[in-house]
Each structure stands twice: as C-alpha cells, then as structure tokens.
Image (cartoon, rainbow, N blue to C red):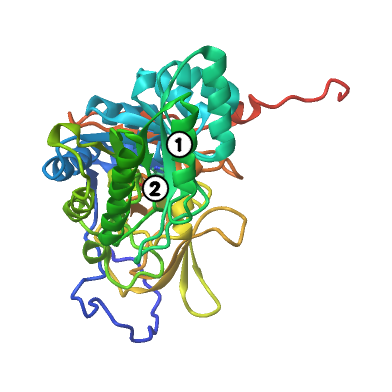
C-alpha cells in the first residue's frame, strides 16, 4: 500500500515522548472496549458516541465497597444521581446494593421510578420545594437539612401530617488541606450546626439521626476526609453527651478524585489520585473518635459520584478536519464538542487513537464542531498526524457529561453500554429533530 503523503514540518524540540516521570506520551491505540470493536459500535450507533463499560462500573463499585467495608463495620453507598442518572447506569449500581442520593424532585422521582424504595433515598441540596419534601418525608426518605428555612418547612410538614421524621443535617466545616464548600448546610465552627441540632431536639417534631458533610469534589488529599470525619465524630459525641441524641449514620458525601487530570495538575493521575483504600483509611481513622459501643457505631454513608463512574465512560469521536493554525500548531476538528463534554473545561482528558499512528507527533489542539470559539476539547497535546475519519477515544468521561450536556447547535449523541456478557445496547438513543421540537409550541396567531 502506498504510504500517504505527509507534509514536512519543523517541530520545536519539546520534552518528547518521556517526561521526567518516565511516562510515554504516545498512547497505545484502543481498538476495543471490553472486547467489542469500537468501529462496530460506531457503525451501529454513529459518531460521536458515549460508551459505558458495565464491567468497569461494577468493578469500581466493588472496589469502593471492599475498601471501606474492610475498615468500617457498617457501610452504605448511595449513588449520586446528578453524576449520571442514565437509567442503565443507576440500575447497575442499585443491583450492587446502592441506595440513591438525590438533590431535586426530578432526581427523587427518577430514583423511585427505577424502583428504589423512597426510604432508601438520601435527599441533599439547597432547594427542596415544600410539596415534594412533604411527599418524600411521608414516604420515609432521609432528608439532609440544608438551612433554617428548610428546617422550618419540615416542622410545618411534621405538624400538618402528624409525623416525626428521622432527619440529618448537612454540615460544612474547615480542614487544613482543602477549602471545603461553605455555602451548603450549617457551619460547624461558627456554632450554626449546634444551633440547628438544638432546634431539632428542642422542637421535638423530628428525630436527628444523621450528620452529613460533602467537602467538595475531586479532592486528592485523603487527609481532608480524616479531619472531616473526626470533626463529625466529635460532634456526634457532643450531641450524645448534651442531648442524648443517637447519631445512626455519618455521611462523608462524595468528592473522591477519578483517574482524570485537572488542567493545572503536574503529576499524572496514576500518582496524584489516591486509591479508595487511602480515603478509607483516613475516614475510618477519623471516625474512630466516635465514643459509642460497637453495636451503636454509626453507619458510614458515602455518596461517591465521579470516582465510581468516570473510568467506565468513553467518548468516541471522529476527525472531520485538519488545519494549520497561524502559530504553527496543528488544529484538529472532531465531531464532539464541549456541549457534550462539559468536563473538558477543567480536565486534561486522556485522548487515545484507535489505530497505530505513524509520523512525527506535533503540538495539536483538538476543537469540537461548534461554531463557537470556546469549543476546544483538548488544549495542546503531542499527536502524530491523523486523517479525516480517524477515531479518537476520550477516556474517563463517565461523570457529569451525560447529565450536564446541552442540546446546542448539534443533536446529543447516543449512549451505549457494553455489557459484562459481551453484548452492547443503547442506554439513550441519539436525539433527532422530533425530540428537540417536541417541547416547542408555535403561538396560534402565527401562520
Ligand atoms: C451532596 C453531594 N453528594 C455527592 C456528590 C458527588 O460528588 P463527586 O462526584 O465529587 O463524588 C455531590 C457532587 O457535587 C454532592 O453535591
């Protein structure tokens, strides 16, 4: 076969194929996902295409479960719906025993629709409309109270319905290593969390059983969790000593980092992202400050999102054009844009070809297909020449993209799952014009 012509290029010497950590920048091609040929998937479902590996979802879930259940006697994992609420993904986790963690009436309804018992749902978030809150409380959902106005709302509901719901409070706190999010829940250090607990205990309209803290997201410092767990444990001790309150669960939220690399990250993610065991050791150590007999130790609840699902998700995209930019870099235009890959704004996503690439790697920027300047899905990376029609796989994209994506300029692509049984099937079909116009109306006065 005749080798295709390659335009000669003078490439400024860069720290070539190796960095000082010995990691080759050249990626081995990825031709299959769990034994299914990527080309077959594209031929069947089109490009771009999200592909989820059922095997990886289950493996990550079991890894998380094992790491924590070895170190703390009572564990519950509640799947964070906002991270990825595709039914097939949620069901995979529920089959493994996960409860649901939701942050809106829509997510609550979706979880219940999927067969999750309402009393196996934790409900977080700053906005829980009173009507939806009432329905959830009556059904036994565990509500994590975010602010005093919500507390008042639950007091009203309890009085109206003659119920005494079990509730939790969300707490924000400080640690030495990460700046925790302070806008959600009651602050611990200022005494606000104490005031909230006192109001619940004194009002006697509900029973305080849980303490919750979600520090933030993509937290690579396991020690932050040690401090948060210890602070919650000591607070539980204080509540027991002062009010006789028995805290039956402590929820450390989500926030574990996945195998992605943040844009500003220096170390590769294999080194920067702690394994689940490191988070588990830190949390178990912090929780050991609990002063309770073994039979009364609280259940540890986790709401891990991205670290459970990111690695299972791939985005297959096709090259639609090559360009030379005025500054000499190569520009590659692909058919997946930031509207379906929201995470490209803060991650340096792993980009892997699906065939062996020949030719000199050169600095290349990957643009999406949108007629918008911001549509850059990978800033400069070293890539050998690619041809129109070549595929690239963007790895670790399972979290937040298929919930935060936008129907903008293009239709949203199909999402498929490759099953542990080697079969593949749709999780969501690609959008078409009918889907987009289905919600629209044209005013009757228009011709
Ligand atoms: C309350 C709560 N729990 C869990 C999560 C999941 O977090 P992550 O995906 O970082 O694990 C989030 C996400 O922000 C959250 O707000």
Q: Position of residue 419 (x, y in %)?
A: 23, 31
Q: Is residue 1 visible?
A: no
Does the Cβ of the disc 1 residue fall within 8 Å of ligand 1? yes
The mark nearer the N terminus, 1 or 2, is 1
Query: In what element is the residue under mark 2?
Result: loop
Give me the residue at 52% from left, 51% from top.
183
Does the Cβ of the disc 2 residue fall within 8 Å of ligand 1? yes
Q: Tell whether label 2 touches label 1 (CB within 8 Å).
A: yes
Q: Is residue 62 visible?
A: yes
- Name the quadrant where ligand 1 sits: top left
Dot 1 alpha-carbon crowd within 10 angstroms: few under 14, some 14 to 19, many 20 or more: many
Give me the residue at 55% from left, 17% from top.
159
Give me the residue at 86% from left, 25% from top.
446
Is 78 placed above or below 1 here?
above
Q: Nearer the viewer, residue 127 or 335?
A: 127
Give me the residue at 36% from left, 61% from top.
175
Query: In what element is the residue under mark 1?
Result: loop
* Residue 45 badge: none
Dot 2 alpha-carbon crowd within 10 angstroms: few under 14, some 14 to 19, many 20 or more: many
Is 33 placed above or below 262 here?
above
In the image, is 367 to the left or to the right of 7?
right
Split into 4 quadrants, where in the image is the N terminus? Answer: bottom left
Is 425 placed above or below 337 here?
above
Q: Nearer the viewer, residue 42 or 269?
A: 269
* Residue 214 badge: 2
Q: Position of residue 360 (x, y in %)?
A: 31, 75
Give the quarter of the image for residue 399: top left
Split into 4 quadrants, where in the image is the C terminus? Answer: top right
Q: Nearer the viewer, residue 117 or 240?
A: 240
In the image, is 317 to the left or to the right of 368?
left
Residue ID for mark 1: 124
Q: Position of residue 126 (x, y in %)?
A: 54, 40
């Amino acid at each position: 076969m005749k080798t295709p012509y390659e335009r000669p290029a003078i490439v400024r010497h860069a720290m070539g194929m190796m960095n000082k950590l010995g990691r080759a920048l050249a990626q081995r091609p990825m031709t299959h996902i769990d034994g299914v040929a990527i080309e077959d998937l594209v031929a069947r479902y089109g490009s771009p295409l999200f592909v989820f590996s059922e095997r990886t979802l289950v493996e990550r879930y079991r890894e998380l479960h094992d790491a924590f259940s070895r170190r703390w006697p009572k564990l519950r994992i509640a799947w964070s719906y906002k991270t990825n609420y595709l039914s097939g993904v949620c069901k995979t986790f529920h089959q493994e025993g996960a409860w649901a963690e939701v942050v809106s009436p829509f997510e609550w309804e979706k979880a219940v629709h999927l067969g999750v018992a309402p009393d196996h749902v934790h409900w977080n978030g700053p906005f829980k409309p009173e009507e939806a809150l009432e329905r959830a409380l009556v059904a036994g959902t565990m509500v994590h109270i975010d602010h005093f106005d919500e507390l008042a709302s639950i007091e009203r509901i309890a009085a109206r319905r003659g119920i005494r719901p079990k509730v939790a409070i969300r707490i924000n706190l400080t640690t030495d290593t990460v700046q925790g999010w302070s806008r959600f829940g009651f602050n611990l250090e200022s005494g606000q969390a104490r005031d909230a607990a006192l109001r619940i205990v004194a009002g006697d309209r509900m029973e305080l059983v849980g303490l919750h803290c979600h520090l933030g997201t993509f937290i690579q410092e396991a020690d932050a969790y040690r401090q948060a767990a210890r602070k919650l444990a000591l607070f539980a001790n204080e509540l027991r000593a002062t009010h006789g309150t028995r805290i039956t669960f402590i929820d450390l939220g989500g926030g574990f980092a996945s195998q992605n690399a943040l844009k500003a990250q220096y170390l590769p993610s294999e080194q920067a992202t702690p394994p689940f065991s490191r988070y588990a050791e830190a949390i178990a150590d912090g929780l050991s400050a609990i002063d309770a007999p073994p039979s009364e130790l609280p259940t540890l609840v986790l709401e891990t999102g991205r670290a459970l699902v990111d690695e299972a998700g791939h985005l297959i995209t096709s090259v639609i054009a090559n360009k030379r930019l005025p500054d000499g870099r190569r520009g590659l235009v692909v058919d997946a844009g930031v509207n379906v890959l929201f995470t490209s704004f803060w991650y340096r996503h792993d980009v892997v070809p699906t065939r062996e690439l020949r030719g000199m790697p050169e600095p290349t920027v990957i643009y999406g297909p949108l007629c918008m300047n911001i549509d850059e899905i990978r800033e400069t990376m070293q890539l050998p020449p690619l041809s129109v029609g070549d595929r690239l796989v963007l790895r670790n994209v399972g979290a937040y993209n298929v919930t935060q994506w936008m129907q903008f300029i293009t239709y949203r692509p199909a999402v498929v799952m490759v099953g542990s049984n080697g079969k593949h099937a749709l999780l969501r079909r690609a959008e078409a014009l009918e889907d987009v116009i289905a919600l629209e109306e044209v005013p009757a006065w228009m011709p």
